[in-house]
Image: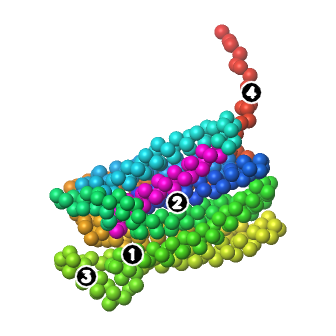
Amino acid sequence: METVDLARLQFALTAGAHFLFVALTLGLATLVAVIQTWATLTRSPVHMRMTRFWGQLYIINYAMGIVTGLVMEFQLGLSWSGLTEFAGNVFGSSLAIETIVAFFIESTFLGLWIFGWNKLNRWAHLALIWVVTLTAYASAFWILISNGFLQNPVGYQLKDGVLRLTDFGALVANPAALVAFFHIGGGALVVGGFLMAGVSAYHLAKRTAEQDFFRKSLRIGIAVALPATLFTATFGGIGFDTLQPTKLAAWSGSARQMAEAQAEMVAAHGPGDYLPSLEWVRTSGIIMMSLFALLFFVSGASFLLMLIRPVVRGFRPWHWLLTALIPVPFVTMIAGWIFREMGRQPWAVYGLLKTADAMSPVSYGQIRFSLTAFVTVFAVLIVVNYWLLARTARKGPGEVALGDDRPAAETPAPALTF
């Protein structure tokens, strides 16, 4: 592989892994906020326990996601200095806003929520989780504003060989970013809903004593997942109107459309191959849509089944199906991300900067070393995150530390001996 291929592979693996953490964070944060709202309004003990249990899973994933995000940031300077030098003045503004939102507002209020259990007024504590949730979506919004500029450059001026931001409003109103934000936001709710339903189904299949707890959790997960699939599919369809002509031609597979798109790019930018990989675009798109159809039909059937209480408690084949489907929304999200990003190639900034020109002046050996280091770190983080989530989920709500105000067992002081 060439140096640029290794750099692209490195960013794909690390950014894709971080993307999975983000999807679960958005979905779980929303579900936890909704459950705590109901618990606060009704003073329901079971819903408050649900808030603590699912909130602890959210915190584990959030913490690991922050680490992956910090590690990933190094790549922009190490491997893609050409991109930051050429276009950093434009898309860097939204990245800076995202940093302020995520690391100053979201993390601060999350810390207050974690340590404010049983210390703050219940309404103040509820307000904290909603601030955390809204700032999580705000963080995703600004990231997609940056990504949307790379997909569809707007609001800029080329001056002295670099891009300058001239219209911040156009940058924020970029349809390539706005449609993607709602599409990904809906997908995150699908991820969170199926995780909650799958973990609940696992405990119900094991004939847990926490029947009421996990019956309610399963119903909430399915009740969120079903409309979220419809919402996500709607904005996914709208998103096809924002696709680049070359990506759309590759997706269609039409030789005539691909020839026309190639001819238009040659006329605008000179000789070169401007079509993305047909195999990557079509395969990832088909996987995304096929799995999404599966999730839609399962969530629709599950919505009907969850209305029958004996079925919720005792229908084990359904329980094991929902448990097995926990990773499917993650695979679907990754397939969609590959479709979006591979379809932009060979451009880093579509129509303005090619990916090969966006690279830093690094050698093959250097990028191979950094690829090995980054992939190793991310592999460890993913394994640790999975292990922590799985262990906490299997233990159930009886061993949750978040918000637990029970006094520690008193132990006698050791006797002094001389």
Residue to which mark 3 is pinned: 264
Q: CA distance from mark 2 to mark 4?
A: 42 Å
- Please give the name of the residue rendered at 28% of the width and 62% of the height, measured from the top-left corner: 156
Q: CA distance from mark 1 to mark 3?
A: 15 Å
Q: Quadrant of residue 165?
A: bottom left
Q: Amino acid at mark 4?
A: Glu
- Please give the name of the residue rendered at 25% of the width and 65% of the height, measured from the top-left corner: 353
Q: Earlier in the sequence, mark 3 or mark 2?
A: 2
Q: CA distance from mark 3 to mark 2?
A: 36 Å
- Say the numbered circle drawn on residue 243: 1
Q: Could you tell me if the residues under marks 3 and 2 are in contact, i.e. CB atoms within 8 Å?
A: no
Return the x and y of residue 166 as percentages of the image width and height: 29, 59
Residue to which mark 4 is pinned: 410
- Please give the name of the residue rendered at 65% of the width and 42% of the height, measured from the top-left corner: 125
Nearer to us: label 2 or label 1: 1
Find the magenta span and give its range: 125-152
